[in-house]
């Protein structure tokens, strides 16, 4: 069965983006898969599960309403605490017009943020 190996994000500053995502997810520097000695992106530490992130330098701006984005789970941490941690690392809050007015019963709330490069991502979790 084919599997997703990594997610590629367009960024203007790959070192800044790598530092953010590394700290946000507890990821480590990953060696390039093909030639060269440049920075490729963060990946889970050896033995940990998760998807690697490739940081592709791009001159184009991040999409305001992207067709593809990351969804993060706050895990056991309170959603608002996790959002504040990510903001302290460099994420920005996004004024997102599509929050559900009447979420489905049992649905986890979520917050939309942008990384240091403007790429949108969601954080879902439980509120204390």
Image (tube, grey):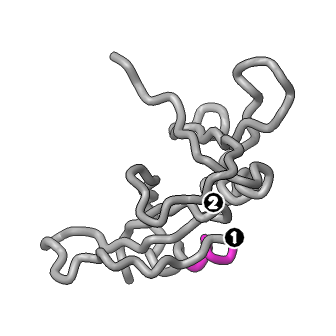
Give 74 or 52, whichever is nearer the viewer: 52
Residue 28 sits inside the magenta stretch: no
Asked if marks 1 and 2 touch (Cβ < 8 Å), the reply is yes
> Quick one: which residue is furthest to the front in this view?
60
Main SS of the magenta part reads helix
The answer to which quarter of the image holds residue 123 is bottom left
**Residue drawn at the location 77% of the way across and 57% of the way down:** 16
The residue at which mark 2 appears reads as 24
Q: Callout 2: few (<14), some (14-19), or many (20+) C-alpha neighbours within 10 Å?
A: some
Residue at mark 1: 89
Image spot of residue 105 (x, y percent) = 13, 73
Q: Quadrant of the C terminus?
A: bottom left
Q: Work out whether residue 117 or residue 22 is closer to the camera in this orientation and state it.
A: 117
Q: Position of residue 19 (x, y in %)?
A: 75, 56
Query: Considering only vertical position in the picture, is 112 above or below 36?
Result: below
Element on which disc 1 rests: helix
Q: Quadrant of residue 96?
A: bottom left
Residue 78 against residue 75 in the figure, above or below: below
């Amino acid at each position: 069965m084919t599997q997703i190996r990594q997610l590629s994000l367009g960024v203007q500053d790959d070192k800044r983006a790598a530092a953010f995502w590394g700290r946000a997810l507890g990821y480590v520097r990953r060696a390039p898969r093909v030639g060269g000695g440049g920075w490729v992106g963060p990946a889970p530490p050896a033995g940990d599960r998760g998807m690697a992130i490739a940081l592709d330098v791009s001159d184009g701006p991040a999409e305001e309403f992207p067709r593809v984005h990351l969804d993060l789970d706050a895990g056991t941490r309170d959603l608002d605490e996790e959002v504040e941690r990510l903001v302290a690392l460099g994420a920005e809050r996004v004024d997102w017009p599509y929050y559900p007015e009447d979420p489905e019963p049992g649905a986890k709330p979520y917050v939309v943020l942008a990384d240091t490069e403007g790429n949108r991502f969601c954080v879902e979790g439980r509120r204390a």
